[in-house]
Every structure is written in structure tokens, then in C-alpha cells.
């Protein structure tokens, strides 16, 4: 052992993203932003999936000592391996030349040697997972373990739960990455050496925020790193869909502001509209809103779903991360009548979809346009059609009546205060300044899903009811928002028509 701190695999991955992130992890972790409910939910899902994955290895042994008992965990790992009985170890601890890791699974192979398995709660293999395994592979081999295979285990989205028995062999999928991880051995060793010198230094590396702050993960030090930075008026990052190479070309010429982009610089049609809006300091109506709205027929309904997406399927016919709608809100505009509202929140732990679909069919009937903001509601409706064939006819009728206001805004209108985003949260305050979400306890879909799942689990009835009320208020605000948005766009279209 050396007197330098150990470099764990999570720190190694931090350092691979950004050396300053790694340095902060060791020297100033208090500067990290607090873990949000949504991020905590992702961590919790990771644990849940990890525990389930262990059940694929009957007779496997868990190394239980936590991070405050590293020496004991190393000793326990050695002891179980030397006994030569356990077919697999979970959370086995290894150390080699100042590198340290807890391996999710090491599995004894029938022909001798071990397979190293990293369990991930996603459905796709990512480059960063291979890097993770490459680090562990080097470490375990260095520590003397005969590792002959390495794989990433993810959830398999092709597996459909029958509602009775979770088939773990089909729920999980192994991606063999041994050769790939092996080929990264020297690079990993070199990077780890560099990182160990870095964390021994009292001086923080001089790194400015950039693309690395969100790839492959959102960095928790972003608020700290970007404090005091000169804020741009309308920075080039506001240009929708600007390719990183083009952004680098602009940066190389010292151009940070949209208004300074030369006329000849290659931009898409939408990017040119954004530049014009910024330069002129006013909105651009660049499409024919009236023509877009010619397709809208009364009564005009506005629909929004809230969904949760369990990693481990809970209901018959669903796969990992299938979105399950648990709440809808519908506002309906009828000429000569006040705005009407209907909603449904499923309050039980059973499958919400049948009852929710029935209530939705009642709420929107068979006539009129159904406005949404983005295509998400269409996707959820198609999932309902697949899951509920006996209601497919009425649900298909709804799909045929959908009208996406998001596309109208994208195709026809831009205001510099959108700041390059067409999300409802950016567009609404501009087009309907008295609208917003600031007064709500729940103000985004991710939080809504997390709170719903939490409310189903709590034994506190009053708390559960409070969350249900907050969820209803949030979803209703979303459909009220699209009512106001449609009305605002109609007003823009009416006096002058298209620009
Ligand atoms: S915010 Fe960006 S620059 Fe700062 S530590 Fe994180 S990745 Fe590095």
C-alpha cells in the first residue's frame, strides 16, 4: 500500500469524465449539489435491480462489509474465494496498487477461472460501462484473480412479463465485453496513474465547464464551476440542434453570442430564424399558424398523461421501463360553455391502465380534436391499445384526433425568450405570462413519477392524499397550459395571419 488515497472505480469514472470532478470528489465533495429526488430514485432502482440480478446465481455469497470496513471486506473476499465453494460472490472487494473496487458479481466458471459481471439497471450497453469493466478487470487481474471473461448485465427490453412469474434468465441480458475491456488495459493503467497523482495534489486542475459537464453523466459540481462565469446574452448554445463541430468552429473564431454569427456561417433554417429573432430582439412568426389550426375541430380537448416506468415490470404484458399511465387530465373547450375539466388518478397498486382508459374514453368522447404538447401522449395511447385490445377501437379513435401544439410552435413561431428550447416550461411563460408552475409542490414529470411511487408505498394516509392532490394539481396545470397556449397562438395568428 502507498500513503495516497485509494482510487475506487466510481472515482475513476468521475476522473474519466473530468479531472476537476475527480479532484472535487476527494478534496471538496461538499461543493456537490444535493441529490435530487429523481436522481435518488435512479440510485434506488440500481440497488433493486442489482439485488434481483444476484438471484440469478443461487448459492452466491454476499460480502456484506460496507465502505467503512474496507479491510474486513478485503479479508472476507479472500476467505470466501479460498474456501473454493461459493459459485459466485457479490460485492467482492479487491485492491491493487492503490486501486480499489467492489465487483457486482464474480462468477466461478466451470472450466476454471472467473467471469466478472457488472450489473446495470439500463436496457442498453454504453461505452462507459465497458470502461468501468476495464478498470475492474485490470484491478482484479493485478490482485491475482484469474478473470477469463467479463460482461455487462442489463435489463432486456424484449422480455415481456406474464404477470405471474419473473423469468430472471430472460429479464436480464449479458453483453460480453471481455476483448474490448482487455484492449483498454494499458490506457486504463495510464489514466489511473495520472489520476492518482492528481488526487495527491493540493492544487485543483484548471478546467472550465464545457461539454464534459453532462457526458456521460450530469456533474454535481456544475453550479459551483459555473458560478461567476460571464453570462451570455443569447449564447450559441441556444441554437437548436447546433452540431458540436460547428459550435467549436464558432468558438475558435471567438464567437460566443448568436448575434455575432456571420451571415455566411452555415446554419439550418430554424437556426437562422433564431439568429434573426435574437438580432431583431423580437418574436418571429415564420409559419402559417392559421393553416396549422385549420385541422382543429370542436370540441377542443387538451390531454396530458403522467406515467411511471418501473425498471422491473410489474404488470402482465409489460417490459422493463414501459411507461404506465397512472393519471390523466383533460380540459375541454366548448363554444359557449365554460372550460370543463376531468381527470383520473389511480390510487391502488394494481394495474392502473384498464380503469384509466375507461375514464379517458368517457372524458374525450368520440368527437373533436385532442391537443397535446409533444408526441408523448400518442406513444402512451399506442401502448394502451397494445395492452387493452378490448378498448382498442375507442383508443385508436383518440389517436386519429391528436394534434401536437409543440409542432405548431416549432414550425411557426420563435421568441428570443424561448432561449432555444420549445419545452412547455420555456414556451408557456412567454406566450401566456400569467401562467406557470412556481406555486405547485410538484412541477415536473420526473418528480411526479417518483412521488406517485412513494405515495403508493407510504402507510401515512394523510401524506398519500397530499401527494395525490399535488399530482392532480400538476397534471391539471399542464392541460390548462396547453389551453392557454392554443389561445395565445390563435391570437397571434388572427390579426395578421402569417408573417
Ligand atoms: S462541472 Fe464540468 S468542469 Fe466542473 S467538475 Fe464537473 S465536469 Fe468538470
Image (spheres, rainbow, N blue to C red):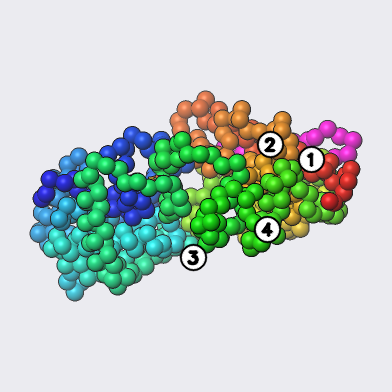
Label 2, label 3: how far apart the Cα atoms are: 41 Å
Query: Do the numbered discs 4 and 1 sit on residues whose CB atoms are within 8 Å?
Result: no
Q: Earlier in the sequence, mark 4 or mark 3?
A: 3
Q: Residue furthest top?
A: 462
Residue 336 colored magenta? yes
Task: Give the quarter of the image for residue 147.
Answer: bottom left
In the picture provided, is 117 more to the left or to the right than 5?
Answer: right
The residue lying toward the viewer, choosing from 407 and 495, is 495
Residue ID for mark 1: 488
Magenta extent = 334-348
| Residue beneath the point at 20% across and 53% down | 99
Q: Earlier in the sequence, mark 2 or mark 3?
A: 3
Instruction: Tell me the tag on residue 158.
Output: 3
Kind of element beneath mark 1: helix
Residue ID for mark 2: 429
Kind of element beneath mark 2: helix
Q: Earlier in the sequence, mark 4 or mark 2?
A: 4
Q: Nearer the viewer, mark 4 or mark 3?
A: 4
Disc 2 packing (10 Å; few <14; some 14–19; many ≥20): some
| Residue beneath the point at 52% across and 25% down | 462
Q: Nearer the viewer, mark 4 or mark 2?
A: 4
Q: Earlier in the sequence, mark 1 or mark 2?
A: 2
Kind of element beneath mark 3: loop
Task: Give the quarter of the image for residue 317.
Answer: bottom right
Amino acid at each position: 500500500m502507498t500513503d495516497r488515497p485509494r482510487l475506487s472505480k466510481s472515482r475513476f469514472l468521475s476522473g474519466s469524465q473530468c479531472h476537476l470532478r475527480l479532484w472535487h470528489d476527494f478534496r471538496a465533495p461538499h461543493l456537490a449539489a444535493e441529490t435530487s429526488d429523481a436522481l435518488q430514485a435512479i440510485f434506488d432502482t440500481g440497488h433493486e435491480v442489482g439485488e434481483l440480478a444476484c438471484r440469478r446465481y443461487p448459492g452466491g455469497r454476499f460480502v456484506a462489509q460496507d465502505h467503512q470496513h474496507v479491510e474486513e471486506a478485503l479479508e472476507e473476499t479472500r476467505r470466501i474465494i479460498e474456501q473454493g465453494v461459493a459459485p459466485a460472490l457479490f460485492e467482492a472487494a479487491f485492491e491493487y496498487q492503490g486501486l480499489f473496487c467492489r465487483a457486482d458479481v464474480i462468477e466461478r466458471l466451470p472450466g476454471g477461472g472467473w467471469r466478472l459481471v457488472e450489473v446495470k439497471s439500463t436496457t442498453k450497453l454504453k461505452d462507459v460501462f465497458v470502461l468501468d469493466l476495464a478498470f475492474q478487470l485490470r484491478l482484479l487481474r493485478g490482485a491475482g484473480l484469474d478473470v477469463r471473461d467479463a460482461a455487462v448485465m442489463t435489463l432486456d427490453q424484449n422480455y415481456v412479463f406474464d404477470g405471474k412469474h419473473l423469468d430472471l434468465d430472460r429479464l436480464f441480458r449479458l453483453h460480453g465485453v471481455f476483448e474490448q475491456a482487455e484492449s483498454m488495459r494499458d490506457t486504463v493503467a495510464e489514466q489511473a496513474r495520472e489520476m492518482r497523482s492528481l488526487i495527491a495534489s493540493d492544487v485543483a486542475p484548471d478546467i472550465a465547464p464545457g461539454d464534459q459537464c453532462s457526458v456521460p453523466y450530469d456533474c454535481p459540481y456544475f453550479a459551483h464551476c459555473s458560478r461567476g462565469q460571464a453570462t451570455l446574452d443569447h449564447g450559441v448554445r441556444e441554437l437548436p440542434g447546433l452540431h458540436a463541430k460547428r459550435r467549436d468552429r464558432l468558438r475558435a473564431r471567438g464567437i460566443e453570442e448568436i448575434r455575432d454569427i456571420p451571415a455566411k456561417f452555415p446554419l439550418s433554417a430554424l437556426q437562422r430564424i433564431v439568429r434573426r429573432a435574437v438580432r431583431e430582439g423580437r418574436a418571429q412568426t415564420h409559419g402559417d399558424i392559421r393553416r396549422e389550426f385549420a385541422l382543429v375541430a370542436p370540441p377542443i380537448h387538451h390531454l396530458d398523461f403522467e406515467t411511471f416506468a418501473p425498471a422491473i415490470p410489474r404488470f402482465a404484458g409489460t417490459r422493463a421501463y414501459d411507461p404506465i399511465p397512472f393519471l390523466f387530465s383533460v380540459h375541454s373547450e366548448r363554444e359557449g360553455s365554460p372550460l370543463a375539466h376531468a381527470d383520473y388518478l389511480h390510487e391502488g397498486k394494481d394495474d392502473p391502465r384498464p380503469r384509466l382508459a375507461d375514464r379517458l374514453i368517457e372524458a374525450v368522447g368520440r368527437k373533436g380534436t385532442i391537443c397535446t404538447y409533444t408526441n408523448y401522449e400518442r406513444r402512451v395511447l399506442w401502448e394502451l391499445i397494445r395492452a387493452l385490445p378490448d378498448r382498442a377501437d375507442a383508443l385508436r379513435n383518440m389517436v386519429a384526433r391528436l394534434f401536437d401544439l409543440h409542432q405548431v410552435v416549432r414550425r411557426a413561431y420563435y421568441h428570443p425568450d424561448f432561449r432555444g428550447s420549445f419545452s412547455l416550461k420555456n414556451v408557456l411563460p412567454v406566450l401566456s405570462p400569467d401562467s406557470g408552475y412556481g406555486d405547485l409542490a410538484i412541477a415536473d414529470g420526473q418528480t411526479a413519477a417518483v412521488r406517485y411511487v412513494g405515495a403508493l408505498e407510504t402507510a401515512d394516509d394523510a401524506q398519500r392524499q397530499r401527494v395525490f392532490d399535488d399530482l392532480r394539481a400538476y397534471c391539471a396545470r399542464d392541460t390548462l397550459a396547453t389551453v392557454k397556449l392554443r389561445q395565445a397562438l390563435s391570437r397571434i395568428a388572427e390579426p395578421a395571419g402569417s408573417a
